[in-house]
Amino acid sequence: MAIETHSIGFIPESERYGHPRRLFTVWFGTNLSIVCMTVGMLGVFAGLSFGWALLALVIGNAIGTVFMAAHSAQGPHLGIPQMIQSRAQFGVLGAALPLLAVVVTYTLYNAANGAVVAPALAATSASARSRRRRCSGWRRCWSLSSATN
């Protein structure tokens, strides 16, 4: 693996690699988190039935996909990242709006992640601490942790 030498500049066709299927693990791993599952269930928590919440998720993803697909299809043709190519659509000052949206999204996602994950970690670590206190020898601890997991 080498260090990126092009920065935000054009990447020649001969130096590009990868396929869309390589992105599956990146996006699957990102979306396999407690906060994503919690956000996915917000419709049900708000009073929608599971079917209506699922339909809302599908429609929302379909609408978002149309715009993102059109935008991301330009990437291979232009050879530059999406945030840089958005300057062509919005202008240098107009690109501040998508940048602001990205910063707000990342900030709120991380805040939600902390709010949802912190109680889970606290419960997990409290459970681990109580198991450690009850263990007197490694065999007893092993059997106790195996029985509770």
Image: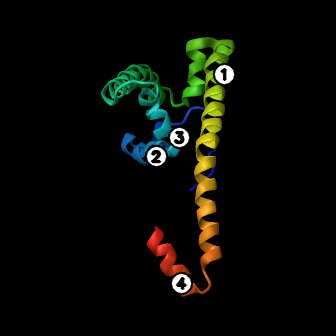
Q: Nearer the viewer, mark 1 or mark 2?
A: 2
Look at discs 3 and 2 and give the one toward the viewer. 3
Q: Residues within 10 Å of mark 4 (few under 14, many from 20)?
A: few
Residue placed under numbered mark 4 in the picture:
140
Choose the circle earlier in sequence order: 1 or 4: 1
**Residue indicated by mark 1:** 100
- Residue at 63%, 61% (x, y): give it: 126
Q: Label 3: which residue?
A: 35
Q: Are marks 3 and 4 in contact (CB under 8 Å)?
A: no
Amino acid carrying label 1: it is: Leu
Residue topped by disc 2 = 32
Q: Position of residue 46 (x, y in %)?
A: 46, 25
Residue 21 appears in the picture as rendered: yes
Where is 135 relative to 31, above or below?
Answer: below
Kindly indicate whether the residue at mark 4 contacts the one at mark 1 (C-beta within 8 angstroms).
no
- Secondary structure type for disc 1: helix
- Asked if labels 2 and 3 touch by Cβ distance under 8 angstroms, the answer is no
Kind of residue at disc 4:
Arg
Quote the CA–CA distance across marks 4 and 2: 34 Å
Q: Amino acid at mark 2?
A: Leu
CA–CA distance between discs 1 and 4?
A: 54 Å
Q: Are marks 1 and 3 in contact (CB under 8 Å)?
A: no
- Front-lying residue, 112 or 60: 112
Q: Is residue 105 above or below residue 3?
A: above
Sort mark 2 into few (<14), some (14-19) or many (20+) by Cα contacts within 10 Å. few
Residue drawn at (43%, 45%) of the image: 28
Question: Which secondary structure, mark 4?
Answer: helix
Q: Quadrant of residue 20?
A: top left
Which numbered disc, 1 or 2, marks the residue that appears first in the sequence?
2
| Separation (CA) of disc 1 from disc 2 | 25 Å
